[in-house]
Amino acid sequence: MKRKILLIFLSFSLMMVLIPQTSFAQAETPSISMQVTPTPSIALTVEYQLPYPGLLPDNAFYYLKTLRDKIVGFLISDPIKKAEFDLLAADKRLNAASFLFEKGKYDLALSTISKGENYFEEAIEKTSVAKKEGRETTNILIKLSASVKKHKEVLTSLGKKAPGNSKAGIISSMKRLDGFENQVNLLISR
């Protein structure tokens, strides 16, 4: 039994050293402001930067990254920190899906978007838990609000490039994001 625990600990430590993906530097809180880009048809651009996804789901070692993320996520007990972690995972998966779309891997991209939305939903749930506990949630709610707008912007862009059979998946994801946006707005208004 001790040998198994030691092996798991060593494996986890090795993954953390060999595959670093997160930075622990304090990031600036994104604003919710929008800017209009000068184009023939007026389009709104959300000022929210998606993080670089690192390994993509089409990489042979991607399972190590997902394993590491599950372990790290399991070890986070603070609901606000967990919400921030889940939001980061959702943002990374959306950006990974964008890269997969560029490679023409539409089915894998749609699957990645769906998994990212699951993380987004978990981030909203953890933020709600923190708010019910009386914790300060303003910063995470601002991030969630900006992120959901960015997700909608990216999905709209991907929807324009998507082949016919992938458009239905994009539309479904957009509807899910509308629900997330409503949930975030409700949390902000409370």
Image: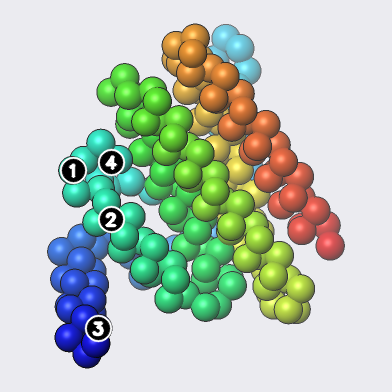
In the picture of the structure, the residue carrying the numbered disc 2 is 65
- 51 left or right of 21? right
* Callout 2: SS: helix
Residue 53 picture location, percent across and down: 33, 46
Q: Tell me if 110 is positioned left or right of 60 in this view.
A: right
Q: Is residue 49 above or below residue 142?
A: above
- Mark toward the viewer: 3 or 1: 3
From the image, tell me which residue sits under label 3: 5
Alpha-carbon span between mark 4 and mark 1: 9 Å
What kind of residue is marked 4? Leu
| Distance between the alpha carbons at the discs numbered 2 and 4 | 9 Å
Find the residue positioned furthest to the bottom.
2
**Marks 3 and 4: which is nearer the front?**
3
Give the residue at mark 4: 56
Q: Amino acid at mark 1?
A: Ala
Q: Given contact means CB atoms under 8 Å apart, are the residues at marks 3 and 1 in contact?
A: no
Circle 4 — which element?
loop
C-alpha gap between disc 3 and disc 1: 26 Å
Q: Residue at x 39, y 63 (%)?
A: 70
Question: In the rendered view of the protein, which quadrant contains the N terminus?
Answer: bottom left
The kind of residue tagged 3 is: Ile
Relative to 64, is 27 on the left or the right?
right
